[in-house]
Amino acid sequence: MSTTPAAAPAQGKAILAGGLAGGIEICITFPTEYVKTQLQVYEKAKLPRYQGTGDCVKQTMRSHGVLGLYQGLSSLLYGSIPKAAVRLGMFEFLSNHMRDFQGRMDSTRGLLCGLGTVVAEAVVVVCPTETIKVKFIHDQCSANPKYRDFFHSVREIVREQGLRATYQGLTATVLKQGSNQAIRFFVMTSLRKWYRGDDPSKPMNPVVTGAFGAIAGVASVFGNTPPDVIKTQMQGLEAHKYQIMKHEGLKAFYKGTVPCLGRVCLDVAIVFIIYDEVVKFLNKVWKTD
């Protein structure tokens, strides 16, 4: 994610570093993703299933123990590694081709590069794995869960509903990923540019990288939670019955914001830190032109 051609890692390094960063990040932050999904997937009623983030955690641990907060981890883990690889690898590829004649990446170019990663990421990885994750988590909280694990849920969903069932909410996913990556990369590129000033080769301290990543994460949460709520409900087991605005009002489009903030701040900070550090290591042991 550097700003000079000399420091830009080879495409293979970007993909490897992105995959490692994504896998480590999701293992650390998944409980917040679980809680966010639970709060979003259940339509508000007179007696809602959960009274908030804390109540969701309490009920889950009471029924399933601490490991209950990791239900559906495998579905997201299987997707997070290729997702991060596609995201960071594609961004690196685009950014290397969109720098100006002085080799610099301004905020607008960063925004365009972020948008350019969206369609490939959403279609190839995000939509199928998110759909499986949402259906699996939703199913595990029913009276008689029918999905045993990730592969069993994939097999049953495809057998019963066809491959198209794993692409429910594709448009909402593209919108979510589009606003997500555009905001994150725009903010991150702007902050990096501000920090480095007139010296684009100035090294980034991991603490600074993490802080900038957290800021970018907060910005993306408030910018793309509404399409995320729409996507989650479209991918759930009862997608046919949801009419969010009619039944729940405007506030419903921000369900799950609190756990999402916790997860995304850690997510973006950890991914950018690990990515930069892995690239530094790879540059030492994997020599490229």
Image (cartoon, rainbow, N blue to C red):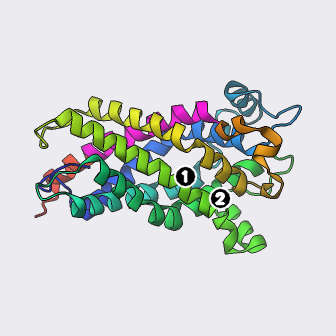
Please state the horizontal and vertical placement of residue 256, each as a whole percent of the image: 64, 36
Q: Is residue 88 visible in the rendered structure shown here? A: no
- How crowded is the residue under tag 2: few (<14 C-alpha within 10 Å), some, or many (20+)? many
Left or right of 59? Residue 122 is left
Check disc 2 and report the residue beneath it: 132
Q: Which amino acid type is marked by label 1?
A: Lys
Could you tell me which residue is drawn at 48 percent across and 41 percent down?
220
- How crowded is the residue under tag 1: few (<14 C-alpha within 10 Å), some, or many (20+)? many
Please state the horizontal and vertical placement of residue 68, each as a whole percent of the image: 68, 39
Check disc 1 and report the residue beneath it: 176
Q: Which amino acid type is marked by label 2?
A: Ile
Indicate the secondary structure of the residue bearing disc 1.
Answer: helix
Left or right of 77? Residue 106 is left
Could you tell me which residue is drawn at 60 percent across and 30 percent down?
258
Please state the horizontal and vertical placement of residue 115, each as a whole percent of the image: 41, 57
Task: Please report whichever mark, 1 or 2, sits nearer to the chain's N-terminal start.
Answer: 2
Please state the horizontal and vertical placement of residue 166, each as a whole percent of the image: 65, 66
Could you tell me which residue is drawn at 86 percent across and 36 percent down?
45
- Res. 183 image quadrant: top left
From the viewer's side, name the closer residue of 47 and 73: 47
From the viewer's side, name the closer residue of 186 and 206: 186
Could you tell me which residue is drawn at 55 percent across and 56 percent down?
175
Say if the magenta span includes residue 236.
no
Q: Which residues are magenta?
A: 256-277
Q: Is residue 242 visible in the rendered structure shown here? A: yes
Q: Quadrant of the C terminus?
A: bottom left
- Res. 70 image quadrant: top right
Considering the whole magenta stretch, tell me its main secondary structure.
Answer: helix
Left or right of 8? Residue 234 is right
